[in-house]
Amino acid sequence: MSNYDLIAITGPTASGKTPFAAALAAEINAEIVSADSRQIYRRMDLGTGKDLADYTVGGDEVPYHLIDIVEPGYKYNVFEYQRDFLAAYDDIRSRGREVILCGGTGLYLEAVLKGYRLIPVPENAELRRRLEEKGLEELTEILGRYKTLHNTTDVDTVKRAVRAIEIEEYYLHTPVEERSFPHLKSLIVGVDIERDLRREKISRRLRQRLDEGMVDEVRRLLDEGIPPEDLIYYGLEYKYLTLYVTGQLEYEQMVRELEIAIHQFAKRQMTWFRGMERRGFTIHWIDARMPLEEKVEQVKAWWKNG
């Protein structure tokens, strides 16, 4: 029996986190809680890389949580994520099963692993007016001046950057009331994928998802009545595909710019994880090229000795 309350598996996009987490879950009687800020949205499947088939191991489905929980267009936030994570965690543990937290959204991971006390942040109309003429580069620079926590890996649109600054300003001037959040003894495992292999997998996966109908997925979301600006807000695939579908980018330009943006996103993720280490987290790195069975056995050994 392990002394750990939780295993967290993280790493950059295309590092193979999900099949690894699912294989481990099948071995230790665990369920998976997603830590992905975009996979929470229903019908946003290809663009978020849900790959739900990865949760089937040996013909059995590993239960997963916090995927497909809200409608597209909703502005879900880290306060809600903490709340929903705790509900899922308590439910899983009440049934005598282990919990694996898996994903690459650094803020979600850190908010759980560190147990940050968070409160809902209202919109600040005056601040938004002051920021409305600024571009993404300047907004990112402003965000970098704050000392508190924010997940800059996900800030790749102007709207998200403005919201991030709004959150930082609120916490700067508002005392944070204590909320009950348990301290969880966590084994944190990072999937370390060599840069060239990561780039190769990202490029191959992007083309595969385009072939599988990612453009049509965005068209369907727009046809549902979701405003283009709401999809653009989610960044990466939804930003560039929406710009293409609405005639603002040519197809080849869209693919080229999107591919560059995903590579940059993966680099920012790694920067975030290294920052976590500087902030006192111990991340046990495991080589992405290691055979899946060996990865699982290595983490089981760490877990049992914790």
Image (tube, helix red, strand yellow):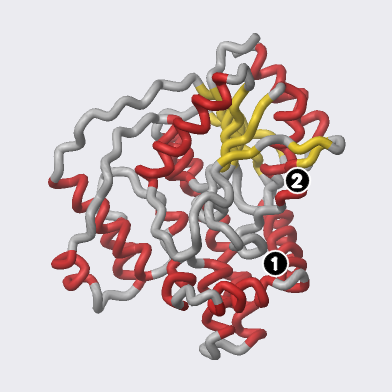
Q: Is residue 153 above or below residue 119?
A: below
Give me the residue at 57% from left, 58% from top. 42
- Secondary structure found at label 1: helix
Between residue 277 and residue 114, name the one nearer to us.
Answer: 114
Q: Residues within 10 Å of mark 2 (few under 14, many from 20)?
A: some
Give me the residue at 40% from left, 30% from top. 114
Check the image and name the residue furthest to the front: 224
Q: Amino acid at mark 1?
A: Leu
Query: Looking at the image, can residue 187 be seen?
Result: no
Q: Earlier in the sequence, mark 1 or mark 2?
A: 2
Discs 1/2, front? 2
Between residue 12 and residue 228, name the one nearer to us.
Answer: 228
Query: Looking at the image, can residue 57 be seen?
Result: yes
In the rendered image, which quarter is residue 127 located in?
A: bottom left
Q: Identify the residue under disc 2.
A: 54
Label placed on residue 206? 1
Residue 78 position in % (x across, y down): 39, 45
Q: Looking at the figure, which quarter contains the C terminus?
A: top right
Q: Amino acid at mark 2?
A: Asp
Q: Looking at the figure, which quarter contains the N terminus?
A: top right
Q: Is residue 272 above or below residue 222?
A: above
Give me the residue at 73% from left, 38% from top. 20
Q: Residues within 10 Å of mark 1 (few under 14, many from 20)?
A: many
In the rendered image, which quarter is residue 293 located in?
A: top right
Check the image and name the residue furthest to the top: 1
Q: Is residue 127 above or below residue 86?
A: below
Locate residue 15 relative to residue 69 in the image: left or right: right
Residue 12 position in % (x across, y down): 60, 49
